[in-house]
Image (tube, helix red, strand yellow):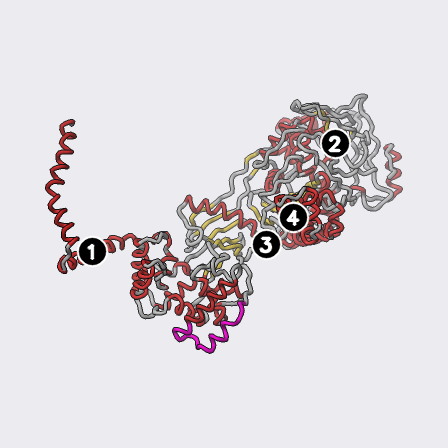
């Protein structure tokens, strides 16, 4: 091996020695050229050039259809009932035929870009040679024909973008291919429909709409010359940002039209003096009936297409979604109607500059967050001087007020049986606020989180009749802070059942129940039931909804309740087809995962029925007349910053949130700020419309009848058999529960609109929270103790900091419902017999 290596230098030296005479002779011919030698050299160079071109041909684009932008089929998004929801296009383009384009456009284009277009076959040799000479002399010029430009526009990746000889050769070869296969009119039509014009406007039709608010067929000479002039450099000759340059370029185009006989000199002299008349408006794709849903679906579908080697924008995919276009329309109308009403209230509180200025500290905070304030600070002003400057700008102050005080709302409906999303409204107006509040906004859920606490309790063995005493609650937290959850009214020192605690959203009762069950267990259960993306802080105040979540998570979790404990992941798509209708993929609903025991779920549904029958959500029945078996929960956060309501039905779960993008802004109303009056009307309106349209069957009911177990069933039969054989005269029937009825007013207190804001305490729960609750009806009878020391239910629990249990009697008498109105005499007689209290 060493010998071979040592021979390499010797071999190279011998080779150079032998080649030296040949090299010397070649150099001599270069210094002393002859005609024959020059001819041979030129022929050799030409041969090399031809060989290089032949080598490049396989690396140039294969010409299938240059009008592929016309035949490309974007993905179509269809609703479950076959309505078009959206089309996913790569660019904003509308194809028009050449005969539907103004002749002024064609004349201006050819006169400026390629006046021998109809004479050449893709490459204008004279223009190319002229451009080369100017480039070599230092004055770089373009020599591309319209066909070459089309080749570059259609195949930028295959041809390349670098200003090299190879790129120009590929461009010329592709142009020859195009000219060989297509007519001049086809080339012109394709070029005019694919050329970009800034502002996401592709093609002459979108350019005409963007810059002149008219169709391409209506463009006059001046407008056509302006658009043709942009082709030399869209940004440089942008008529919106650079009107002076655009005007100068337009007149050059007009002069070219005169030069090649497309315009008379007299007309040119008149037209060149006219100013630019731009009627600019960005062209946006229509949002469609479910824009936020489509926005989220695009992300999912793009990933699916990449994994399965499909093009989202050209393969003609047909995506069949779970959205019901009828329910989607109803949801959108409900959000707009309630949003507009609440906006009027917000405008009265914040809309004027004076009203906005009444929140002086908050307004100053907003102004300090503006770019104008930062610019003033960067200019060297002090904080106070910068604030004075921006505060004196009335238009700025008004703009800040309007943007900060715009009411937002979102809505989501899904089928709890299969997880199919039926309606999705991410904001009041997609064009003004494309931010999707359904999936992206995380806000405190308030009392809509309470059902998870009760679910954990029922799963641990608690009964709806178990009670806690309505008394002051103080819970010591890690770090030594004391959390004191409160309600609208003062503690009554009376026992309140779990059923009434949830129906009337009693915070002190829920806080005590949370201590009994344990925050960790509640957090785990809520995650299992559907709150799977947001972080839940396992602290006592979690019972009142202090951990921010999304509406999608909450509706999904309530779907688990409606599905009697079976969690089904929300789905958006049922099937994907190709352009021929052949099924590419199907997405069957996932089987339910039993995350909450069926018995606990049945109990929870039954208790949540009372929320809408006589509790904080009673407007669902009274105002909106929603029939059928429904249950739900209201929610309001600290300072009325967020209003929530979620309603469940065996076939449909629907939820809404209302608030502001900035949680520091509220409606400034203890009435309208409550979820029962801000969010509930959206859901109520939606359900009312859905039931009237027979899209929700009011006859369907939850299967909440508790089925006795094997042992209990046989024990009951055995007991009946013994009682039949051995009847006892001393057997005393248990006294029936006393029902107290309202003698002083027609409408029971349960329908009063006194829901209060809640659970706004931060996760550290250091401060006392003013939480959502509704006062219990004053018609509850005085408790009758059954033992000297009645206590809270003793069911499974987890140790927590400051855990405590309330005391009280086993149960309280049922609260009257709207139909429980009887004559006063009957009430008085019943009360006297039972010792009840009939005072209001």
Judge whether residue 659 can be spotted in this image.
no
Which residue position holds label 4? 409
Which residue position holds label 3? 431
- Cα gap from disc 1 to disc 3, whole angstroms: 61 Å
- Cα gap from disc 4 to disc 3, whole angstroms: 14 Å
Rendered position, 836 above or below 131: above
Rendered position, 583 above or below 382: below
Q: Which mark is residue 768?
A: 2
Q: Quadrant of the C terminus?
A: top right
- Cα gap from disc 4 to disc 1, whole angstroms: 73 Å
Left-right relation of 305 to 674: left
Judge whether residue 152 can be spotted in this image.
yes
- Residue 560: give x, y in percent of width and height: 60, 38
Which residue position holds label 1? 45
Secondary-structure class at tag 2: loop
Quarter-of-image position of residue 540: top right
| Foreground label between 4 and 3 | 3
Which one is earlier in the sequence, the residue at label 4 or at label 2? 4
């Amino acid at each position: 091996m060493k010998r071979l290596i040592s021979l390499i230098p010797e071999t190279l030296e011998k080779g150079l020695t032998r080649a030296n005479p040949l090299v010397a002779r070649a150099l001599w011919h270069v210094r002393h050229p002859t005609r024959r030698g020059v001819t041979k050299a030129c022929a050799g160079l030409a041969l090399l050039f031809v060989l290089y071109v032949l080598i490049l041909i396989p690396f140039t684009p294969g010409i299938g259809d240059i009008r592929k932008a016309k035949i490309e089929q974007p993905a179509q998004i269809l609703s479950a009932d076959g309505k078009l929801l959206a089309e996913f296009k790569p660019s904003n383009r509308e194809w028009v035929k050449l005969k539907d384009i103004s002749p002024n456009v064609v004349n201006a284009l050819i006169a400026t870009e390629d006046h021998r277009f109809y004479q050449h076959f893709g490459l204008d040799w004279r223009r190319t040679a002229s451009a080369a000479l100017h480039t070599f002399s230092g004055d770089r010029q373009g020599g591309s024909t319209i066909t070459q430009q089309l080749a570059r526009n259609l195949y930028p990746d295959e041809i390349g973008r670098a200003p090299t000889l190879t790129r120009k050769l590929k461009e010329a070869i592709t142009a020859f291919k195009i000219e060989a296969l297509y007519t001049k009119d086809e080339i012109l039509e394709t070029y005019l429909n694919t050329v970009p014009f800034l502002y996401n406007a592709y093609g002459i039709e979108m350019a005409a709409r963007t810059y002149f608010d008219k169709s391409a067929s209506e463009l006059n000479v001046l407008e056509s010359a302006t658009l043709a002039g942009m082709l030399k450099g869209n940004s440089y000759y942008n008529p919106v940002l650079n009107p002076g340059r655009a005007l100068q370029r337009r007149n050059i185009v007009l002069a070219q039209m005169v030069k090649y006989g497309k315009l008379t000199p007299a007309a040119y002299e008149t037209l060149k003096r006219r100013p630019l008349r731009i009627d600019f408006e960005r062209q946006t794709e229509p949002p469609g009936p479910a824009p936020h849903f489509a926005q989220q679906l695009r992300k999912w579908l793009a990933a699916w297409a990449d994994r399965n080697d499909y093009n989202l924008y050209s393969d003609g995919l047909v995506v069949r979604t779970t959205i019901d276009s009828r329910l989607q329309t109803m949801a959108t109308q409900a959000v707009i109607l309630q949003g507009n009403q609440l906006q009027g209230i917000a405008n009265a509180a914040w809309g004027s500059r004076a009203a906005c200025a009444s929140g002086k500290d908050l307004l100053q905070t907003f102004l300090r967050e503006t770019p104008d304030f930062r610019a003033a600070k960067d200019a060297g002003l002090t904080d106070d001087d910068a604030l004075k400057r921006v505060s004196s700008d009335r238009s700025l102050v008004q703009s800040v007020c309007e943007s900060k005080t715009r009411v937002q709302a979102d809505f989501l409906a899904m089928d709890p049986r299969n997880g199919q999303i039926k309606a999705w409204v991410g904001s009041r107006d997609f064009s003004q606020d494309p931010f999707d509040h359904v999936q992206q906004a995380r806000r405190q859920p308030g009392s809509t989180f309470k059902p998870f606490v009760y679910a954990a309790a029922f799963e641990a063995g608690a009964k709806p009749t178990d009670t806690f005493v309505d008394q002051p609650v103080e819970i010591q937290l890690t770090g030594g802070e004391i959390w004191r959850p409160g309600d609208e009214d003062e503690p009554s020192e009376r026992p309140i059942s779990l059923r009434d605690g949830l129906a009337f959203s009693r915070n002190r009762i829920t806080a005590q129940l949370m201590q009994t069950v344990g925050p960790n267990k509640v957090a785990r259960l809520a995650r299992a039931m559907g709150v799977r993306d947001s972080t839940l802080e396992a602290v006592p105040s979690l019972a009142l909804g202090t951990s921010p979540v999304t509406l999608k998570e909450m509706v999904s979790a309530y779907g688990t309740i409606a599905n009697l404990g079976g969690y089904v992941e929300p789905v958006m798509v049922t099937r994907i087809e190709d352009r021929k209708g052949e099924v590419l993929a199907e997405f069957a609903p996932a089987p339910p995962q039993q995350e909450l025991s069926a018995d606990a779920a049945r109990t929870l549904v039954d208790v949540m029925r009372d929320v809408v029958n006589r509790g904080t959500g009673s407007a669902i029945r009274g105002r909106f007349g929603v029939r059928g078996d429904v249950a739900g929960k209201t929610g309001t956060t600290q300072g009325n910053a967020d209003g929530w309501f979620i309603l469940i039905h065996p076939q449909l779960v629907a939820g809404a949130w209302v608030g502001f993008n900035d949680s520091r802004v509220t409606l400034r109303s203890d009435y309208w700020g409550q979820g029962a009056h801000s969010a509930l009307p959206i859901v109520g309106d939606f359900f009312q419309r859905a039931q009237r349209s027979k899209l929700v069957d009011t006859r369907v009911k939850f299967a909440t009848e508790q089925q006795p177990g094997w042992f209990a069933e046989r024990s009951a039969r055995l007991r009946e058999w013994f009682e039949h054989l051995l009847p006892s005269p001393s057997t005393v029937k248990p006294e029936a529960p006393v029902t107290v009825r309202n003698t002083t007013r027609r409408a029971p207190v349960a329908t009063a609109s006194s829901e209060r804001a809640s659970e706004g305490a931060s996760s550290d729960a250091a401060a006392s929270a003013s939480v959502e609750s509704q006062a219990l009806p004053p018609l509850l009878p005085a408790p009758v103790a059954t033992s000297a020391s009645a206590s809270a239910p003793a069911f499974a629990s987890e140790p927590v900091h400051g855990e405590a249990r309330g005391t009280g009697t086993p149960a309280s008498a049922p609260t009257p419902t709207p139909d429980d109105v009887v004559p006063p005499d009957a009430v008085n007689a019943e009360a006297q017999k039972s010792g009840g209290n009939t005072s209001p």
